[in-house]
Image (cartoon, rainbow, N blue to C red):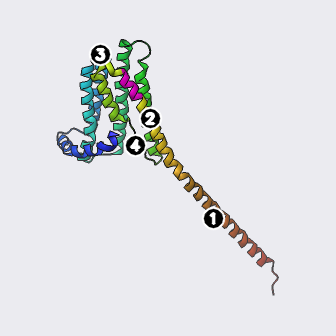
Amino acid sequence: MFDGRFRTEAERTLRPVGAQIKRTGITADHLTLLGIVMAAGAALAIANGALRAGLLLLVLTALPDVLDGAVAKASGTASPRGAFFDSVADRFTDALLLLGVAWYLATTQPGRIALLPMAVLGASMLISYERAKAESLGYEAKGGLMERAERLIALGLGLLFSSVLVPILWVMLALTLVTAGQRFAKVWKQASAEVPAAIAGRERRNRRAADRRVARSTTRQVRRRSQLRPPR
């Protein structure tokens, strides 16, 4: 939701900042790597119970994620390779953060509640896959109630108020699954709209092929008759 509504505007606003960073020699790839390192630090802090330190590092992790696009556009180096690297880095940092939360819950909570962050991770990977697969097929699958920005904000609130961390994770799981359903329905609708057109196109091709076969058959019959006709 935030990604769709505010990310483009944020990148446009931060483009002058990206131009300044570019002059220092820092590239978008450097910022993406920095985000991974900060996410690893946040995961370690969370796993060891330093939730406020983890929250601080989580906030710092988000900054390179926002700035790398601005730097790439300001330097004219935006490319499919960079977009691929950024997307993979986002999935990797998500996994690191939620693994850190799972480790923390495994040492502080009874039962199997440590599996809850893993369920959130699985659901978040599902919606990322839906978008990637839809775009590879030529469809659009952005949007939903719980995209990456919302997940990071919710996780930050859970780290700030540790007493509600587990309820927040349940809410994240529910809304992430809802988002997966929203994206599935969105792509299903787009793909279903093309089915009648595809069938109609196939029928037109079949009719044209049948017409060509009839024309070839008629031509052969005319030639055969002309060859059998006695000379006058």
Q: Nearer the viewer, mark 2 or mark 1?
A: 2
Most common SS among magenta residues: helix
Measure the C-alpha gap from mark 4 to mark 3.
Answer: 34 Å
Q: Is residue 24 left or right of residue 221?
A: left
Measure the C-alpha gap from mark 2 to mark 1.
Answer: 46 Å
Q: Nearer the viewer, mark 4 or mark 1?
A: 4
Question: Of label 4 and label 2, which has the lower sequence position?
Answer: 4
Query: Amino acid type of disc 4?
Result: Lys
User: Residue 169's x, y, as percent?
Assistant: 38, 25
Say if residue 203 shows up in the picture: yes
- Residue placed under numbered mark 2 in the picture: 178
Question: Of label 4 and label 1, which has the lower sequence position?
Answer: 4
Query: Amino acid type of disc 2?
Result: Val
Measure the C-alpha gap from mark 1 to mark 3.
Answer: 71 Å
Question: Of label 4 and label 3, which has the lower sequence position?
Answer: 3
Measure the C-alpha gap from mark 4 to mark 2.
Answer: 13 Å
- Between 73 and 177, the one lying in front of the other is 177
Does the magenta portion include 172? yes
Query: Amino acid type of disc 3?
Result: Gly
Q: Which label is found at residue 208?
A: 1
Q: Nearer the viewer, mark 2 or mark 3?
A: 2
Q: Nearer the viewer, mark 4 or mark 2?
A: 2
Question: Of label 2 and label 1, which has the lower sequence position?
Answer: 2
Q: Quadrant of the N terminus?
A: top left
Measure the C-alpha gap from mark 2 to mark 3.
Answer: 30 Å
Quarter-wise, where is residue 21 in the image?
top left
Please state the extent of the stretch shown in magenta in the rendering: 166-173
Q: Is residue 128 above or below residue 158?
A: below
Dot 3 falls on a residue whose secondary structure is loop
- Residue placed under numbered mark 4 in the picture: 142
Dot 2 falls on a residue whose secondary structure is helix
